[in-house]
Image (tube, rainbow, N blue to C red):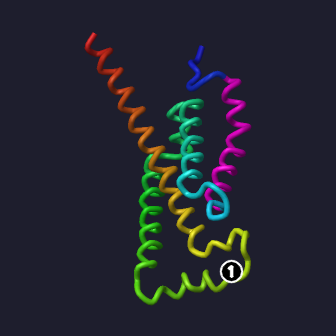
Amino acid sequence: MKKNKGMADTVKIVTDILKGFVFIYGVNIVLYGHLSPGGGFAGGLIIAFLLILMFLVFGREEIFRRFTRKTAHTLETAAAVVFLLLVSFEVIPGGIGLLEFFENLITGRTFRLVSGGRIPLGNIALGVKVAASIFLVFTVLAIFRETEKEEEKDDK
């Protein structure tokens, strides 16, 4: 009989059903963070915990087939660069034309998604960075734990 990786089939089915809803909820928290409690950090945590849940439920091989560590590292680095560029545009005297375009585009439209000007862009970059970073930390710790267990078995 073939050993099934991950958790029981019932847990896998429930996770399969809920993963889309949890992802959309995390994205919603990121996008509307300037209008309600939340933002890039909170939404990124929700998305990271979804990835960790999938890692635990489906097993390491399945999650790495869908979302590799290299992809997570690339997303984390790119999001950090985008976030730093957005922050650096704030301190440049005189402003940047593209960012001022966003400000002028949404004048008078309060309580809408685009009413935050540059803030939603920063929230998106921060959300991607937090989700990728926490997922990477979890995977490194999980792999380190498995390596330690294998070393203990070898010692016995």
The amino acid marked with disc number 1 is Ile
Q: Is residue 8 magenta?
A: no
Question: Mark 1 packing: few (<14 Cα in 10 Å), some, or many (20+)?
Answer: some
Residue 26 x/y as whole percent: 64, 50
Q: Name the residue rendered at 42%, 66% in the picture.
A: 81
Residue 134 x/y as whole percent: 46, 45
Compared with 35, 11 (above or below) is above
Label 1, secondary structure: give it.
loop
Q: Name the residue rendered at 44%, 72% in the picture.
A: 87
With 132 as the anchor, is 17 left or right in this view? right
- Please name the predominant secondary structure of the magenta segment in the image: helix
Q: Is residue 28 magenta?
A: yes
Residue 44 x/y as whole percent: 55, 51
Q: Name the residue rendered at 48%, 56% in the picture.
A: 129
Compared with 47, 150 (above or below) is above
Q: Name the residue rendered at 72%, 45% in the picture.
A: 21
With 40 as the anchor, is 93 left or right in this view? left
According to the picture, the residue beneath numbered tag 1 turns out to be 106
Q: Which residues are magenta?
A: 9-31
Residue extending farthest to the top is 156
Compared with 37, 81 (above or below) is below
The N terminus lies in which quarter of the figure?
top right
The C terminus lies in which quarter of the figure?
top left
Residue extending farthest to the left is 155
Q: Nearer the viewer, residue 128 or 94?
A: 94
With 54 as the anchor, is 24 left or right in this view? right
Q: Nearer the viewer, residue 70 or 76?
A: 76
Compared with 156, 90 (above or below) is below
Residue 142 x/y as whole percent: 42, 32
The image shows a total of numbered marks equal to 1
